[in-house]
Image (cartoon, rainbow, N blue to C red):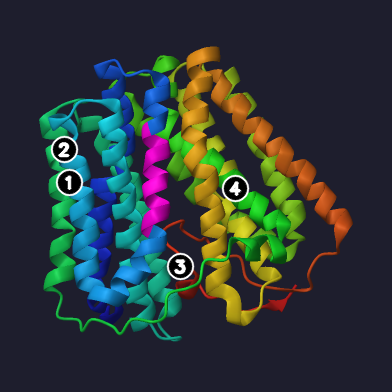
Amino acid sequence: MRLLITFAALFLSVFLLQLGTGSVAPLDALSGVELGFSKSEIGTLGSAHFLGFFIGCWWAPRLMGAVGHSRAFAAFTASGTIGVIAHMMIVDPMAWAALRMLSGLCVAGAYTVIEAWLQAKVTNETRGRAMGVYRIVDTGGSLAAQLVIGVLTPAAYFSYNLLALLCCAALLPMLVSKSEEPAMNAAPRLRPALAWKRSPLGAVGVIVSGVTSAAFRMVGPVYGLEVGLTQDMIALFLAAFVVGGALVQFPLGWLADRYDRRHVLIAISAAAIVSCTVTIGVSGMGTVAVFAATAFFGATTIPIYSLSTAHAHDFGQDDERVELSAALMFLYAVGAIASPAVASWLIEVYGPSAMFVFISAIHVLLIVFGALRMRARPSRGPRTPYIYTPRTSFIAGRLFRRTPREG
């Protein structure tokens, strides 16, 4: 209970931030359809979000070092609020892309501040419980953000104003907290080549995760409308994806800690191809079938990031955990930046099923590359424990520490 009280302000800010920013992507997709944006233009909005996200990950530690945690959090949250509330003032796809960069900047920057604050305050005795609550709050906020879409009217001032108010509300718990602001640690260096040097398969895996997750999260609402879902069902459609990914984390982590992670990664990637095929096949079989296929798709694709990072950390050194996490996040962002634009163009040219054909092709490449890497070197003996790792900030490497253990 004391732990919850200590971090209550931070966790409340996380939840409100998820509600305010997590709903922007699907609302933009639905609003874009309502306003007559092309599918390619809607995809560009998703790519712009991840461009802002990457800039925020890189810039946030430096801004914290210059002005402190609270002021940095206020600056990033204010940028996100501006990005949300200005949507209906400038109804133009290119203007929205610039605003979505502000939203992506807000997400990465604000999460970096929160995770740096947590990192400074948790101890070895409280880390496990604190991170458990943090994951629950973050996942719960993400799920709630998808469900909020069901009550928001696309392309309406009220909808964007409500999300902006939630972003503003996320400021209050953090800024009025009596908890003393922590000292700023040195910002991690960004060395993307480190990920490839330690684990080429882990590096490719996080890129594939970025391609897959960004394509569905940013363009998924367009797909849902194309296969016959009504706007009020899009919220449940997106929530099914999140729930599917959350439910499989524990059993998949159990497998990843007991068997060669390359086998598990290849198997789950093969299952992702099956889920893409099933999703295409049931697209005309009604709402329940579409939701079930979406949950299956989430269960086979969301864990790939955590699996890939766990495999990469098996080959990392203790003194480079943070920089390795930063390198992997960089590669995730690289895949995520391009993916929504490509997926939306494919849907526009070839139809809704093209997005899942694209995702399947990416996973075929991952399977082939994984098989080649298994021939290149043996599995690592001492392994780090599998940990569900949220794709939030470079600081996550400090929070979710990994200590090698015998496999």
**Mark 2 Cα shell of 10 Å, populated few (<14), some (14-19), many (≥20):** some
In this picture, which residue range is highlighted in magenta? 45-56
Task: Classify residue 89 as left or right of residue 402.
Answer: left
Q: Amino acid at mark 3?
A: Ala
Mark nearer the viewer, 1 or 3:
1
Which residue is most to the right? 375
Q: What is the C-alpha distance between the residues marked 1 and 3?
A: 26 Å
Circle 3 sits on which residue? 396
Circle 4 sits on which residue? 207
Circle 2 sits on which residue? 86
Which label is found at residue 82? 1
Q: Amino acid at mark 2?
A: Ala
Point out residue 270 in the picture as x, y percentages from the top left corner. Answer: 71, 39
Q: Quadrant of the C terminus?
A: bottom right
In this rendered view, identify the residue nearer to me: 115 or 138. Answer: 115
Q: Quadrant of the N terminus?
A: bottom left
Q: Amino acid at mark 1?
A: Ile
SS assignment at label 2: loop
Against 306, residue 145 (above or below) is above
Q: Are marks 2 and 1 in contact (CB under 8 Å)?
A: yes
